[in-house]
Image (cartoon, grey):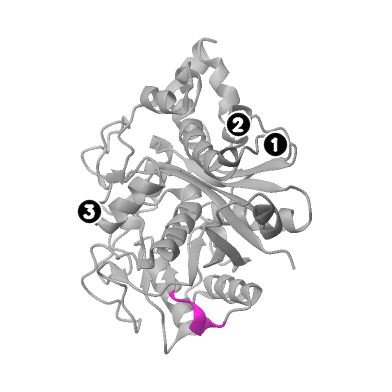
Amino acid sequence: MTRIVVTGMGMITAIGKDTGENLESLKSRRHGIGPLSLLDTIHKDELLAAEIKLTNDELAAMSGIADGERYTRTSLLGLIAASQAYESGIAKYGKTDNTKTAVVSTTTVGGMDKTEKHYRDFLESSKYSHFVYTHDCSDSTRQICDHLGIRHINSTLSTACSSSINAILIAAKMIKHGLADRIIAGGTDALSKFTLNGFNTLMILDKEHCRPLDASRTGLNLGEGAAYIVLESEASAKKDNKEIFCEISGYANANDAYHQTASSPDGYGPYLAMKEALEVSGLKPSQIDYINAHGTGTDNNDLTEGLAIEKIFAPDIPPVSSTKPYTGHTLAAAGVVDAIYSILSIQQQLIFPNLNFSKKIEELSFEPVRELKQAKVDHVLTNSFGFGGNDSSLVLSKY
């Protein structure tokens, strides 16, 4: 049986420009939620978000891009995180022959940050017409491949908030079927007026700092960021004497097809995703040491995810927390951001706290971890649940 391992990681979020900075923020309870200062929106004095406090020019400089104005913010964030993953898992070992290196990337907003800024200009002149070609979701994937010199398979997925866990799932299957030697998988999303206005219209944004898994929760805070991991077979990693961060031991995608934006009341989709991911891993529920919950802070998600967790793990529910009060909900990037936090949890033998918790949800029997906790962490289950009921779970194990 082909075992799939992680040999590289990279990320940029509102709490850090790389995995090291993110870890220090998690340990010190330093979050990135606050007023908007870069996104030009009428809601900037009303809504909080996890904004990366770097301009596009500053992001371009970090990426080594000379003409950053021609790139979307989504692409720039993706370039930074994917380059970090590439450096730590591939280039570091002198493996710069990318003949069978693939990229599976995800985004939900695509190039909307440029499209919405120049929409009227498109109608009146051709000055900004080049941004029309950056609008679609695959643009950031192409930019990453070009930047890293990757000419093998590349694929772009968009399944809302479960996107990047699905990228990892697809990447693992591709490696098992011999379609690539190694794959850079992850996601990137920038804040835009389109997403802010859309979630505000759905009335699921919290005007205060979000409170996942709390009885007083009223919604989520949006965030932006990007994260990527390098996956390869255990045999490939060992052959090149690579450091192995963890094993991808289980994964699953399920869909309860209940509603366009809500989970089914009994959490059947989340239940199926977690149950099948455990079955793929060969682990028993009692062997999971920590659950990194999707935990958005919305009334529907937190209750239904909690009910699904109880259905599988009760009465001995492992420690549970959501890390979204740190980074906001980074949409397509959320799954892989949480996956890297889960890997850090295994590496550091730490369980990260669920910020802002004060009162247990009445319908649930458990409450989340409130403080940074040293613990034995060999297996972590992490969840990402998307609109349309597209629910995915991932099991990461100590190697």
Q: Helix, strand or loop at disc 2? A: helix
Q: Is residue 58 left or right of residue 243?
A: left
Neighbours of disc 1 within 10 Å: few (<14), some (14-19), many (20+) = some
Q: Helix, strand or loop at disc 1? A: loop
Q: Is residue 304 above or below residue 194?
A: below
Q: Is disc 1 in contact with disc 2, using a CB cutoff of under 8 Å?
A: yes
What residue is shown with label 3?
208
Marks 3 and 1, Cα distance to the nearest angstrom?
Answer: 46 Å
* Viewport quadrant of the C terminus: bottom right
Neighbours of disc 2 within 10 Å: few (<14), some (14-19), many (20+) = some
Q: Identity of the amino acid at label 2? A: Leu
Residue 108 in sight from this viewpoint: no
Residue plotted at (41% across, 75% down): 306
What residue is shown with label 1?
98
Residue plotted at (35% across, 49% down): 22
Percent across and percent down for residue 272 are 59, 74
Query: In this orientation, which residue lies closer to the viewer: 257 or 5?
Result: 5
Percent across and percent down for residue 4 are 65, 60
Residue 148 tag number = 2
Of labels 2 and 3, earlier in sequence is 2
Q: Identity of the amino acid at label 3? A: Glu
Percent across and percent down for residue 360 are 27, 77
Q: Helix, strand or loop at disc 3? A: loop
Query: In this orientation, which residue lies closer to the viewer: 394 or 72?
Result: 394
Front position among marks 3 and 1: 1
Marks 1 and 2, Cα distance to the nearest angstrom?
Answer: 9 Å
Q: Is residue 110 above or below residue 241?
A: above
* Viewport quadrant of the N terminus: bottom right
Q: Is residue 144 magenta?
A: no
Highlighted magenta segment, given as a residue range: 284-289
Of labels 3 and 1, earlier in sequence is 1
